Every structure is written in C-alpha cells, then in structure tokens.
Image (cartoon, rainbow, N blue to C red):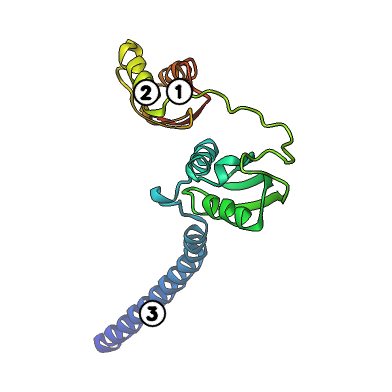
Amino acid sequence: MQRSDFLTAALLSALVSLAACNYAYSDRDADSRAATTPADDAAVATSGTLPAGDVPLDDAGVTRRIQAKFFLDQTIKARRIDVDTQTGIVTLRGDVASDNERAQALLLARTTEGVQRVEDALSVNAALGPSGAAAPASIDLPAPARADDEALISLVQSRFGEDASLKGATIAVTAKDGVLLLDGTAPTDAVKQRAISLARGTEGVVQVIDRIQVER
C-alpha cells in the first residue's frame, strides 16, 4: 500500500470515530436533561413557604381583640356575644336587638386583624332592652355600685407598681363602667396571670378583659 493511501485510510477512520463519539455524547446529554427537568419542575411546583408577614395570629389573640372591640362599642358592649375562633374562622353566637346591631358586630369582627372568615350565628331579639336583658322590666333593679373609672385605673396601676414581679411588664390600664382592659406585654405567662389576678382582686372591678401579650 502506498503511503498516501495509508494516510487517507487513517484520516477516514479518525473522522468516523469522532462522529460516533459526538453522537453518543449528544444522546447522553439529552437523556440527562430529560431525567433532571421533571424533578426540577416538581421541586418548583411543590416547594414554598408563607412569607413571615402572612403568619396568622393565634386564635386566642384574635378572640381577645374582637372582645376588646365589642367592649369599646357603646351598643355591642351591652350584648352577650360569644366569640369562638378556630384557625382564624370566627363564630359569633348570642342575641342582638336589631339587624343593625348584628351588622355592627359582624363588621367589628371582620375588620379585626387575623380574622379569615366570620360565621354569623347571632339571633335578633327585638325584646332586648338597652342593658341586653330581656324586657319587660316591671321591676327596676338597681345598677351595681361601681367605682369611679379614673380612681379605679389609678388603684390598679398603683397595685401593679407595688408588685415586684411585674417590673418587667408594660401594661396599660383603661376602664369603662368598672370593666378593665389590660393591654401590653409581659415577659412570661406567670407575670401575665399575676397582673390579671391583681386586677380582678381590686375592689370595684366588675370584669377584666385581657389583651396582654407574652413576649417570645
């Protein structure tokens, strides 16, 4: 065989080998992409967490906020409305005197932070009087004696200031007709319960509404 024929045959053999390698590599690369793409798509489709700002309030906190809003409303505070919160879904049960009162109670609940939905189980009872008790009132019962609200606030704040266990708490005290609203923060649940106990044990206090948050 001549030298030129030998070189030509060797060159053709090298070209054939190179083409075969490229073809095999292309097949492996396509298989690799086909194998990994679905897994990547599945990871994107199934992964994800709620942003920190979307974490809902706990149910007890939502209930306390609604009760506080009812307490501050001059009409709704006279009604006995039970507030039950489960995973952000609030159910209102009780009697109101009119459809307007029902609408007001539902509005107050729906506009409270942390509420996902409000279930209306309220009943309209036109016989309800201003106090929320059913008329007729043939016998006028005297209203219970209540301490002056400003004096009551001062007394409770004084008791809080004298109790060493409450030094780490920041609690604001407001009152209306002997009903106290405690709002603020406490370092532990034990401190919170101590503040509530002191408030309830104060002469002239009719009810205590707790909105104290325990620091995390």
Q: Which residue corresponds to the image point at 34% horizontal and 11% vertical from the top-left?
A: 163
What is the spatial separation of the Cα atoms under label 2 and label 3, in whole angstroms? Answer: 97 Å
Q: Which residue is mark 3?
A: 19
Q: Residues within 10 Å of mark 1 (few under 14, many from 20)?
A: some
Badge nearest the viewer, 3 or 1: 1
Amino acid found under the numbered disc labelled 1: Ala
Q: CA separation, marks 2 and 1?
A: 7 Å
Q: Amino acid at mark 3?
A: Ala
Q: Residue at x 38, y 20 (%)?
A: 156
Number of marks in the rendered image: 3
Q: Residue at horizontal 57%, vertical 24%?
A: 144
Residue 21 position, x and y percent, is 39, 73
Secondary element at tag 1: loop
Check disc 2 and report the residue beneath it.
151
Where residue 169 appears, x then y in whole percent? 33, 23
Cα–Cα gap, marks 3 and 1: 99 Å
Mark identifier at residue 39: none
Q: Which residue is mark 1?
A: 147
Examine the rendered structure and indicate whether residue 177 appears above or below residue 128: above
44 shown above or below 207: below
Q: Quadrant of the C terminus?
A: top left
Left or right: residue 142 compared with residue 211: right
